[in-house]
Amino acid sequence: DAMVIQNPRYQVTQFGKPVTLSCSQTLNHNVMYWYQQKSSQAPKLLFHYYDKDFNNEADTPDNFQSRRPNTSFCFLDIRSPGLGDAAMYLCATSREGGRWVSTDTQYFGPGTRLTVL
Amino acid sequence: TQLLEQSPQFLSIQEGENLTVYCNSSSVFSSLQWYRQEPGEGPVLLVTVVTGGEVKKLKRLTFQFGDARKDSSLHITAAQPGDTGLYLCAGDVQGTDRGSTLGRLYFGRGTQLTVWP
């Protein structure tokens, strides 16, 4: 079935040790998103790719980077994780019709739970 | 600034009660989605509403999009413990030129619903 896949589901890293989370999709959607979600809070958008165009949210720390080598894959790099970066990281995709057409529904992956020791 | 205001933030009720969750904005949306998220999982789409005044039903859940497409509500009849979760609304901003909002959905803060047996 077409879906959004995130690996790993659980990731443990040490304070300051770089970590990469991955997301892949078989939906062939042109928009991919990374969200950070802390306990019982709404997802907070970090950035999104519209095709290859990268869109960073103004309040996303420089510690967070992203790469999208092709349509199917997108990576979230945390260069120096701090204790405050422990959270669920959600990847989502949508099909964007264009400047005049509304964004299609977002489809979420199951998330990666990041623990920082 | 929160584009979508969701209320209440927390709701704790007994099985069999009815409830309504609200999602309000001063902006007009092309479409609005409702998601439900369980602990440790990604949000799962419940419904998308597109037309002003539209009402959609999903078993005991009734979704309404405001006539002006600025607000929406989710009503649950005879709530069950299985309805427990975080309910999120998200909207796509309308505009003749969506410019920097291209590809972006705006999420409310979420309503954490707990239904006790």
Image: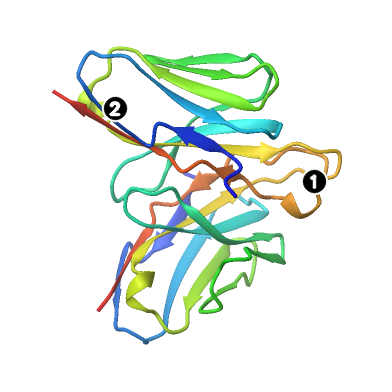
Residue B105 lies, with reference to residue B51, above or below; the image says: below
Per the model, the C-alpha gap separating discs 1 and 2 is 35 Å
Amino acid at pointer 2: Asp
> Which comes sooner in the sequence, label 1 or label 2?
2
Q: As displayed, is residue B54 above or below residue B1?
A: above
Q: Chain of mark 2?
A: B
Estimate the x, y position of residue B42 in percent, counting from the top left: 39, 48
Q: In the displayed structure, would residue A13 be above or below residue B59?
A: below
A9 vs A52, left or right, is: left
Give SS at disc 1.
loop
Mark 2: give few (<14), some (14-19) or many (20+) Cα within 10 Å. some
> Residue B20 in the image: x percent, y percent?
40, 20
The residue that disc 2 covers is B83
The extreme bottom residue here reads A16
Q: Position of residue A9 (x, y in %)?
A: 32, 62
**Which residue is label 1 attached to?**
B98
Residues B64 and A69: in front is: B64
Say if B6 sits above or below A24 in the image: above
